Image (spheres, grey):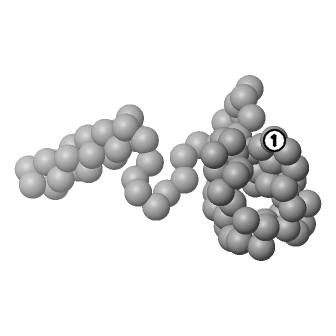
Amino acid sequence: MFCRSALVLSLALGLGCRAYGPAVGQTGDMRPTRGPELAREITLEVVAKHDPDTLVARDGSTCLVAPDVYASTRVGSLFRCRWVR
């Protein structure tokens, strides 16, 4: 009786976890999407600025920012952004 109950409980938990997505630290199923995927944010050094809203990193990556952020960011500073190569 105990073994049967443990089996039913294990199956229920397994199906429940599968229904609500992967557990923390696991990856989900990889399915193609139609929309572009966002890059993760990384911190790079700003080596140039292009008016009116583009910051440029040493590797040529660019980051579009709001006008007030553009104005307050200095060349040579480190900036965290979703840089696009």
Mark yes or no: residue 44 visible: no
In the image, is residue 50 above or below residue 47?
A: above
Left or right side of 44 for 60:
right
75, 5: nearer the viewer: 75
**Residue 19's spot in the image, x, y percent?**
38, 35
In the image, is residue 21 above or below residue 49?
A: above
In the image, is residue 64 above or below residue 31?
A: below
In the image, is residue 34 above or below residue 18?
A: above
Question: Residue shown at 31%/39% (left/top)?
Answer: 16
Question: Residue shown at 69%/60% (left/top)?
Answer: 73
**Residue 52's spot in the image, x, y percent?**
81, 41
Q: Quadrant of residue 2?
A: bottom left
Mark yes or no: residue 27 visible: yes
50, 82: nearer the viewer: 50
Question: Residue shown at 87%/49% (left/top)?
Answer: 50
Residue positioned most to the right:
60
Left or right side of 23 for 64:
right
Q: Quadrant of residue 36?
A: top right
Residue positioned most to the left:
1
The secondary structure type at the circle numbered 1 is loop
Number of numbered tags placed on the structure image: 1
7, 26: nearer the viewer: 26
**Residue 42's spot in the image, x, y percent?**
67, 63
Residue underneath mark 1: 52
Label 1 crowd bin: few (<14), some (14–19), many (20+), radius 10 Å: few
Residue type, mark 1 in image: Pro
Question: Residue shown at 59%/43% (left/top)?
Answer: 29
Q: Quadrant of residue 77?
A: bottom right
**Residue 61's spot in the image, x, y percent?**
85, 57
Left or right side of 15 for 57:
right
